[in-house]
Image: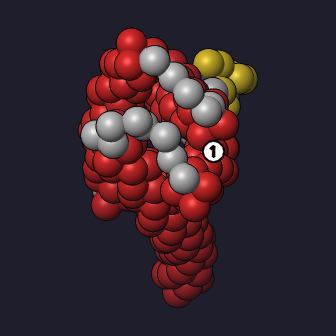
Amino acid sequence: MITTILTSAVISALVGGFFNIITTKKTIKSQVVSKARHEWIQEVRNLVSEYLSKTYNFYILIILNVDNETMILNEKDYKILQDKQLEIQKLSVKIRLFFGEYKYTKTGEEKDSLNIDYNSKIKKIERLTDEIETIFRERTSKVEESEEETKETRERVIKLRKELDLYIENVTEYTSKYLKTEWEKTKNNK
C-alpha cells in the first residue's frame, strides 16, 4: 500500500513537472516573440513616421515653389529639394524591406497581397518625388521659358503634388491599421 502511494506520488510529481516544463517553455517563447514583435512595431512606426515626415517636407517645398512665379529654384533650394528626395528614396527602400512581398507559412511560400499593395504605394511616392525633382532640375538649368510653358509645368506639378498627397494619405492610413492589428496580436500573444 505504501508502495502504491509512493508510486502515485512519484508519477504525479513527474507528470506535474513535465507539464510545468512545457508550460514554462511556451510562456518564455510567447514572451520572446511578443517582445520581438513589439520592438518590430516600434521600429516600423519610427521608420514610417520619418518617411512620411520627409515626404511631407518635400511636399511643402513643392507648394512653396509652385507659387513662385517662375518656378525656377536657386541652387540652394534645388539642393534642399534634391536632398529631401534622396532621403525619401533611402527610407522607401528600408520600408519595403520590412514589408516583404512573400510570407512563409507551414505549407511554404506565398504572395502577401497586402504587402504587395503597400509596397506599390511606397514605390509610387518614390516615383512621384523623383518626377517632381526632375521637373525642378530641368527648370533650374533653363534660361528662358514662355509663359505657356511655365503654366503647363505648374499644372503638371500641381497634378503630381495632388497625387503625392493622396498616396501619403493612403500610406498613413494603411500603416496605422497594420500597426494596430499587429499590436492587438502582440497583446493577445498570437
Q: In this view, does 51 lie to the left or right of 63?
A: right
- Residue located at (51% from left, 32% from top): 132
Helix, strand or loop at label 1? It is helix
* Residue under numbered circle 1: 89
Q: Is residue 138 left or right of residue 115?
A: right
Residue 162 x, y percent position in the rendering: 30, 26
Residue 127 x, y percent position in the rendering: 57, 27
Q: In this view, does 166 lie to the left or right of 10?
A: left
Residue 173 x, y percent position in the rendering: 27, 38
* 14 w.r.t. 159: above or below: below
Q: Nearer the viewer, residue 190 or 179?
A: 179
Q: Dot 1: few (<14), some (14–19), or many (≥20) neighbours within 10 Å? A: many
Q: What residue type is labelled 1?
A: Gln
Residue 74 x, y percent position in the rendering: 54, 53
Q: Does the rendering let one see residue 97?
A: yes
* 148 w.r.t. 11: above or below: above
- Residue located at (51% from left, 23% from top): 145
- Residue located at (33% from left, 55% from top): 183
Q: Quadrant of residue 66?
A: top left
